[in-house]
Amino acid sequence: MSDSPRRPRSTGRSTQGSRPRSTQDRPKRPPEPEVADDVTWFDLDRAARAELRSLPKEMAERVGAHLAMAGLLIDTNPDEARSHAEVARRLASRVAVVREASALTAYACGDFDAALAELRAYRRLSGDQSHLPLMADCERGLGRPEKALDLASSPEARKLPADVARELRVVVAGARSDLGQFDAAVQILEQDAGLTSDVVDDSLIRLRYAYADALAGAGRGDDAANWLSTVAGQDVDGLTDAAERVQGD
């Protein structure tokens, strides 16, 4: 379906003599954020650059530079990162990687409504389902845990690779906790064999952190404290606030 707006139905009234809208009436765009001198579209990965090659060369390089800036800033200055992503979106809204950047920066800024809309657009353009956990988490952020659970039970969710399915499991457990179903959240996380493995990676750190929270919600304070301590020892990159929470106790 075309994304172009529908024409309004005729009101039957003549438009003769109507005053065209002045350009002075239009809201001014904010100034375009500056791209650092040492940042270019070559800072993007090869797949992203390949997508941008559907654009004219100069446009591809301009959009790519803003995407690269968004990627550099998203963890430290999400608002500025989003401003770069918005420039890219204005220039190339039909490129999937652009809508992905718009979604991720909106999510980082806590604008879950916009992030969800952009994630849907990205999925429609790319066919990629890898951000399904993020979409479900946006539904949680909007106070709609039931919709997060609906997404998790969709046919697309059953086809996710193992690492993405684990991220979705964490979101599902969070949705159950949102609904006060803490025992169910604990059981969901216990279904992941990686929970008690010797492997330590980012997805397992998030899984174990969520498990500690679910245990606490279920009234199992000692077990929760033990798991939180485990996560604090494993999370050397500060993915969670486990260390701060342990020290606070």
Image (cartoon, helix red, strand yellow):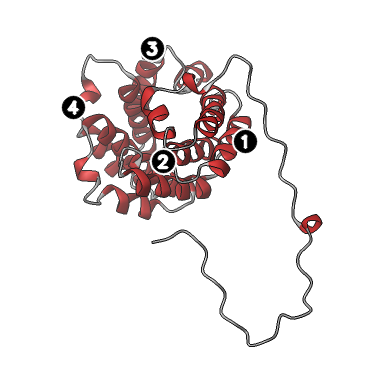
Q: Circle 3 — which element?
A: helix
Amino acid under disc 1: Ser
> Distance between the Cα atoms at labels 1 and 3?
36 Å
- Image quadrant in which you'd find residue 53: top left
Position of 215 with respect to 107 (left or right) is left
Q: Circle 2 — which element?
A: helix
Position of 172 with respect to 58 (left or right) is left
How packed is label 2: few (under 14 Cα within 10 Å), some, or many (20 or more)?
Answer: many
Camera-nearest residue between 68 and 213: 68
For image coordinates 38% across by 12% down, the residue present is 233
> Distance between the Cα atoms at labels 4 and 1?
40 Å
| First in sequence: mark 4 vs mark 2 | 2
Location of mark 4 (residue): 193
Camera-nearest residue between 204 and 214: 204
Q: Circle 4 — which element?
A: helix
Q: Circle 1 — which element?
A: helix
Amino acid under disc 4: Ala
Amino acid under disc 3: Gly
Location of mark 1 (residue): 83
> Distance between the Cα atoms at labels 4 and 3?
20 Å
Camera-nearest label, 1 or 3: 1
Q: Which residue appears farthest toward the right when viewing the image?
A: 24
Q: Which residue appears farthest toward the bottom when viewing the image?
A: 12
> Which percent across, then down, holds residue 87?
60, 38
Location of mark 3 (residue): 233
Amino acid under disc 2: Ala
> Which percent across, then down, holds residue 97?
43, 36
Location of mark 2 (residue): 96
How packed is label 3: few (under 14 Cα within 10 Å), some, or many (20 or more)?
Answer: few
